[in-house]
Each structure stands twice: as structure tokens, then as C-alpha cells.
Amino acid sequence: VHEKREELIDLVTSDRRGFVGEESSPIRIRENVADNNWVLEGISMWTIANPEELVALLRKGQTNQTTMATTRNNNSSRSHSLFQITVEGQRVGEKKPRQGKLLLVDLGGSESLKNVKAHDAEQEELRQKQAIGINSVLTSLGTVVTQLNRHANVNYRESGLTKLLKDCLGGNARALMVAQIIPEVEHADEVSKTLDFAAKLATVENQVRINRVDESHSLFKSHSVRAAELLKRVQKEQNPTEKARIRAEVQTLNSRILTKDTVTEMLVEVAERHAEKMAEVQSIVHDGIASFRQTFEGLQEQDETIRSNVTGTVEKLITDQRLRDGVMATALEDRILQLKQAMDSSSSSIGTDFEKMQQERLRTLGDLGQH
């Protein structure tokens, strides 16, 4: 995305890691009037035979997605990415094949121009341009959701993203949104806006119905017809090399056409791998619990030892304090007794001196009287 302009890039076939300011890609969104929907032209389509091939394509797309280190995220997505999985099938007795579509959407997070910066100062201008584009598309998506909730006329032409998500936004699909939020208090405002948007999206009502595919546009039908033609050719072919090539092509086509039996085999294989993983997880959890229990019991023993040591130390301190208090009390009593004895002695001495003074005074008076 570049400011108000959206640029579409095939992440599976392209090795471009940055796209802002580059030439526009040949991919474009075209309106399909027949089914009142939007389709991509120029995008790569891959026929897969198993889940591993699908995951490999998804990972390749993630590798080519543009990212940048910011003050908020060391691996911040600089675009919105979509990964579409289309499944076709035909039940016995039905004329037209059915089609199902799974669209995985990774929305670039809303980004503040002031509160977030690029780690590399030289990329700050580029980051701001990308943020403007990301936020612009998110605003368009929010506008469409608001229009749907108000049952107003919905303008899916707001952006390329809203065109491609038309099925998921009030159309013929089921939608699930996972909102990622940050727990820190300083981001409370952004968290509130994110949850508010998710709540609004959750109230959008879609109209789910069975999708029928025209046989002329059905990959399932074309693969089946091609496989039948090759089987006829291999019976007539005389050249061993060509016959082997045709059989290999038939085998490849059949690997991409899942029957009830092949689906059952695949589900059994998936279930077995899941059971192995669960057994591995249970073993790890069991070992972890045993290790935790052992550690906990060791801590309990340490706790009891510490408690015992602390109790003994406290009791000794109390005993020592009592002994010191007893010695001090005895010394204090002795000192009080000494002071009392000194006071008694002093009082006795004062009394004796007073009597002597009285006798001396009487004697002096007697002498005066004689004269």
C-alpha cells in the first residue's frame, strides 16, 4: 500500500521485499457481474495434493511479506495479506460441482504516526507512508462494517481489501476475526478501538448458501475429464516411454482429486499424526509435572529445614535475652540495696550530728546564763 494507492503483489511468486514507490504490479481486481463478486486477475493459482503443499505455499508467502522493525514490533507487517484456499467437489447424482472458499486474512495493525517510530531512522519516512496506507485501508474496512450494521447501502468499492472480502462481509461466507491486543496500560486507547471494531464485525450477518460452479469453470471437472481422456490414450499407446509419461500425469491428476476413500485415508493419517503429537505432548507434560513435583518436594524440605533453624534461633535468642534480663535484674536489685544502705547510713549520720549540735547549743546557752 502506498498512501491512498493500493498495490497488489503475488507473495508466492514474487521475491520483492519492499513495494512502496515501485512500479504497480500487473495484478488487478475485476468485478464479476455474473455472481456479483470481485475476482483477482494475474494472481498465481496452485493445485495441491496434500496439506503439506498448502503449508509450504503459505510459508513462502509469509517469507516474502514486507516487514520492518519498529519501536512497537521488531517484525511489523507493512501490508495486509490474503491467502485463499478454494475447494471443489461433486456429490454422486449432482450435475454441478460445489465450491468452498477459505480466505485467511492477516490485517496490518493500525499504527500511530507519532507514538511509533522505525528503529532505523532512515526508514522513518517510508514507515509513515506505509502506516498511512495501512490505516487508510482499515478505515475503509471500518466504514463498510458500519454500513452493514446500519443496513445502509454498502460501498465495497472503498478499497481493494473490501472488494475481496465482500463474501466475508455480509456475503455468502462465515467470518471469524481474531483481534490481537497489547496488555500494557499505555495502549489502552488502541486496545479499546480494536475491541470495539471486533464487536461491530461480530454483529454483521452473512447469508450462507451452497455455492454451485459452472462446469466450464470447474477445475475439478477439467481434472476429471483430463484424467479420463488420458486413461483412454494410455490403452492405445504403444510407446513405453510415452505410456509411462501418460500414467504419471494421470497419477498426478488423481492425487489432486480426492475421493471418499482418499479423504478417509488422509483423515486417518492426520488423526494418527495428531495422536502421536498428543502422546508426545502428554509425555512432556507428565515429565514436567514429575519434575515440578520433585522440585516442590525439595522446596518443602528446604522450607521445613529453614523453619526449624529459624525456630531454634528464635528460641535461643529468647533464652539468651531472658538470661541477660535476669543478670541485669539481679545487678539492679543489688545496686538499689546499696543505695538504700547508703541512704540509711547518711540519715543516721545526719541525726547524730543534729543531736550534737543541739547539745552544744544548750551548753552554750547555759554558759551565757551563768554570766
Image (spheres, grey):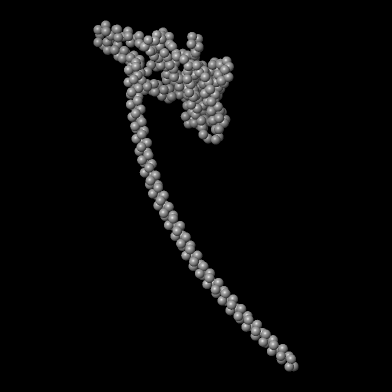
- Can residue 75 be seen here? yes
- Position of residue 90 relative to residue 274, above or below, is above
Toward which corner of the image does residue 141 lie, by quadrant? top right
Residue sitting at x 48%, y 9% = 34
In the image shown, does 272 or 86 lie closer to the viewer? 272
The x, y position of residue 351, in whole percent, is: 63, 81
Toward which corner of the image does residue 296 lie, by quadrant? top left
In the image shown, does 95 or 253 lie closer to the viewer? 95
Residue sitting at x 55%, y 34% = 186
In the image: residue 316, left or right of residue 223: right
Residue sitting at x 38%, y 12% = 90
Residue sitting at x 30%, y 14% = 248
In the image shown, does 255 or 325 lie closer to the viewer? 325
The x, y position of residue 334, in whole percent, is: 52, 72
- Can residue 81 be seen here? no
Quarter of the image where the C terminus is located: bottom right
Residue ranking furthest to the bottom: 370
In the image shown, does 338 or 233 lie closer to the viewer? 338
- Position of residue 38 relative to residue 336, above or below, is above
Residue ranking furthest to the front: 93
Q: How many callouts does the rendering have?
A: 0
The x, y position of residue 111, in whole percent, is: 54, 28
The x, y position of residue 19, in whole percent, is: 49, 21
Toward which corner of the image does residue 270 lie, by quadrant? top left
